[in-house]
Amino acid sequence: MFFHIAGVTVNPIVVIIWMAFVGFVFSTIGAAGGILAGVGHITIFGMKKANVIKPMNQILTLVSPIISTPLYLRERRLVIPAAVSLGVGGIIGALLGSWLSHTYLKEMASYQPVFGLITFVIAGRMWYEMTPKFREKQQKVKKATKAFEAKVKELKAAGKMSEIKEIGVNFSEMGINNTFTFAGETFRYNTIAPFLAGVFVAIISAALGVGGGFLLVPFLSSALGFPMFIVAGTSTMSIVISSLTSISNYLRMGSKLDLPMVGFELIGILVGSYLGPILSKYIKGIYLKGFLAVVLTYIGIGYVFGPMILHAFGFRII
């Protein structure tokens, strides 16, 4: 099937299968969705229009945040002022990043190596997540998260959801220096920090056509010290704001979306996102991350150093 705006001929079944893989990976390990979507557009489908790829990538990365944000709101597992601060910064960064990318990374020859560099960053994160230190930390986080979710379920069943204020996010001080409590613990942060982070992350994510969660999650958990219970919800809300801004600006500047292709892609994403939690019971996360780290490292080498390797040794990496 020929997709006119994308400028490629590709079997819709191939589109659905690849995006099902993207949805599966994102729903099981929570990362690399935008990167893998970009790899599909660039390498699997063979698209050559950089300014079409970027907004199409971001549309696909929006599926999970749009679905999950209301759930986090309901369970009070996000810090709204921090998410708004990230989002306001994200609007500025998304406008700037999309303009810079649309203007200076409009050709695949310039866009692909930069995309390859960020692929290296994601691969590096995957390698780090396989270290014993990180895995031990994640086991504690998962245990605590399950305990929190069990408490929420218990309150719902008993008709005592009003008591969620004892464990959910509650705001006690608002302004430049914000204070909130979560599960009985008090946390403080400066509003300017997430605003600046929102600008920085959105510039990168908008320029490359990715979601930005790979940068926001470490910032919220490490730099601001937020507990992991509320990091995901806080980051997804800001991703929705910045991604919608970026997509809108690309379209305003003349980029187009191949809607038929996007339709097939969304089918694949939804299928993969549904199958992920089911199939992940039979696949160890460490194996999936290892496989993904190898693949992303290889892709990064191909995108960044491929032309030099071809010139020096006469063979193509990717």
Image (tube, helix red, strand yellow):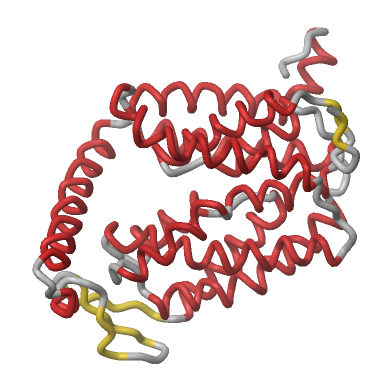
Seen as rendered, the residue at the extreme top is 314
> For the C terminus, which image quadrant?
top right
The quadrant where residue 45 appears: top right
Which is nearer the eye, 123 or 182? Answer: 182
Is 152 rendered above or below residue 316? below
Which is nearer the eye, 8 or 141? Answer: 8
Say which residue appears at 87% left-offset and 48% top-offset: 106
Say which residue appears at 35% left-offset and 69% top-offset: 78
The quadrant where residue 70 appears: bottom left
245 with respect to 31 (left or right): right
Is 28 rendered above or below residue 103? above
Say which residue appears at 41% left-offset and 54% top-offset: 218
101 with respect to 75 (left or right): right
> For the N terminus, which image quadrant?
top right
Q: Position of residue 180 (x, y in %)?
A: 26, 80
Is 263 rendered above or below residue 84? above
Say which residue appears at 83% left-offset and 41% top-offset: 110
Q: Position of residue 55 (x, y in %)?
A: 73, 53
260 with respect to 283 (left or right): right
Q: Position of residue 284 (x, y in %)?
A: 31, 24
The quadrant where residue 118 appears: top right
Is 95 rendered above or below residue 228? below
Q: Position of residue 170 (x, y in %)?
A: 25, 81
